[in-house]
Amino acid sequence: QFLQIMHNQTGRMARLIDDLLSLSRLEMKPYLTPGTEVDLRQTLDSVIDSLGPLARENSVAIERDFANGPLNVPGDRDELFQVFENLLENACKYGQSGGRVVV
């Protein structure tokens, strides 16, 4: 039981360090107007697919509710992926078990 607690706390600390490193990288970058367009539908589909195991583990259903057609927005795909991954991961972890998240 003690090893399980240590394992959980180590994972939590690793996530905190990753978040701090991400924030640091973002703060170091000069703000540039995005020069490319990103298909948000594809990005969100990738995020939802990558978080499927976490959602199942927490008994949370992630549902898609997208408009038809492309959802192009100016931005950086990796940064948008990271933002939505963080939001959906938090919704899965801290939402109610048996709940649902609608994207």
Image (spheres, rainbow, N blue to C red):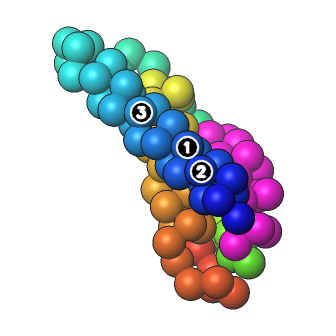
| In the foreground, 13 or 19 | 13
CA distance for labels 2 and 1: 6 Å
Tell whether 78 sits left or right of 28.
Answer: right
Quadrant location, the N terminus: bottom right
Q: Which residue is mark 2?
A: 6
> Three-letter amino acid code at disc 3?
Ile
User: What residue is shown with label 3?
Assistant: 17
Q: x and y percent of residue 74 in the render?
A: 40, 31
Q: What amino acid type is highlighted by mark number 1?
A: Thr
Task: Look at the image and tell me whether residue 71 can be seen.
Answer: no
Vertical position of residue 52 compared to residue 93: above or below: above
Q: CA distance from mark 3 to mark 2?
A: 16 Å
| Position of residue 20 in the picture relative to residue 45 (left or right) | left
Eye-nearest disc, 1 or 3: 1
Mark closer to the chain start, 1 or 3 = 1
| Residue holding disc 1 | 10
Q: Callout 2: helix, strand or loop?
A: helix
Residue 24 on image: x %, y %: 28, 23
Q: Helix, strand or loop at disc 1?
A: helix
Left or right: 87 in relation to 47: left
Labels 2 & 1 near each other (Cβ < 8 A): yes
The magenta stretch is 41-58
- Residue type at mark 2 is Met
Towards the viewer: 6 or 74: 6
Name which quarter of the figure residue 4 lies in: bottom right
- Going 62% across and 40% down the picture, which residue do you hit? 43
The outermost residue toward the front is 2
| Vertical order, 83 against 17 (above or below) | below
